Image: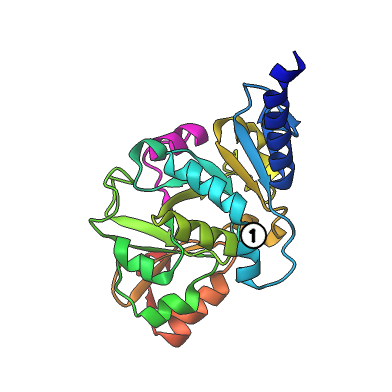
Amino acid sequence: MKACCLPFMVLFSFIRTAGIRLNIYSFTLNRPFRSVGMCKELKTRVLRLSAQSSGDPTSQQQEWTEILSATVKALKAGQVVAVPTDTIYGLACVAQHSAAVRRVYDIKGRHGDKPLAICVGEIQDIYRFCKVSVKEELLRDLLPGPVTLVLERSSTLNGDLNPFTKLIGVRVPDHPFMRRLCQMCGEPLALTSANVSAQTSSVAANEFEDLWPSLAVVVDGGPIGDKSRLGSTVVDLSVCSRYRIIRTGCALSATVQVLEGKYGLLEDPVNQ
């Protein structure tokens, strides 16, 4: 009997050790568990990022390698994950995966006519999925940062993503984990806020626990600054030499200063 149990005990010990080292918690029925091997019903993994001890992206990437790998695996399998950004927590999936995009709408209970933005890891990636009508220097003055730029979409982008508009919002978050995640995926991520209601934006992972059972992975990066509850500033740059503020967000003043003060763009009369 003992000999028969030995392989199971070795396997259980390995899973338990790996779970602790990854800081993995699986979630079901509103209760956290410390081991991924305790119950067949457990599906959602909560991966907790340790505190950022330095501003060195390289050291952070080394520390987060296993969490990044697990999140990328879920995304490439067509799953939806929750991730921290430089503003609020977001729900993300691979934008080129139509079924995953529909899943995001289902989880949020959101109407299909509400557009999703995309998130990329590098400014150069914007040119793959958007038709850019402004100088690259302008992009680099605003990104990475808490700004969503609305541009004309290119044919490369999944036609099932926001099929009702020729425009797309694009972000490069000023968050090393999110940027590395996009780079490792090699594809744009469709991104929307993880807020449960339109009035409450999520700045801590436990503020949207009701959504956890619908997600493959929740990356818990800890609380995000209160000012970020406003979300990113959304600005339409699809018309040459003009801009239109769609959402004021948390970076309005700095964004307008760049657009008008440095590049001489005029505000769309609709906003004046």
User: On the picture, is 233 further left or further right than 58?
Assistant: left
Question: Given the image, on which type of amino acid does mark 1 rest?
Answer: Ser
- In the image, what residue occupies the spot 34% across and 74% down? 242
Q: Is residue 152 magenta?
A: no
- Please identify the residue farthest to the left as the structure is shown: 155
Tell me the quarter of the image containing the N terminus.
top right
Q: Which residues are magenta?
A: 101-117
- Examine the image and state in which quarter residue 97 appears: top left
- In the image, what residue occupies the spot 35% across and 56% down? 168
Q: Is residue 113 magenta?
A: yes
Tell me the quarter of the image containing the C terminus.
bottom left
Residue 198 shows in this picture:
yes
| Whole-percent x, y for residue 4 in the image | 69, 17
Residue 38 shows in this picture:
no
- In the image, what residue occupies the spot 70% across and 40% down? 19
Q: Mark 1 sits on what residue?
A: 228
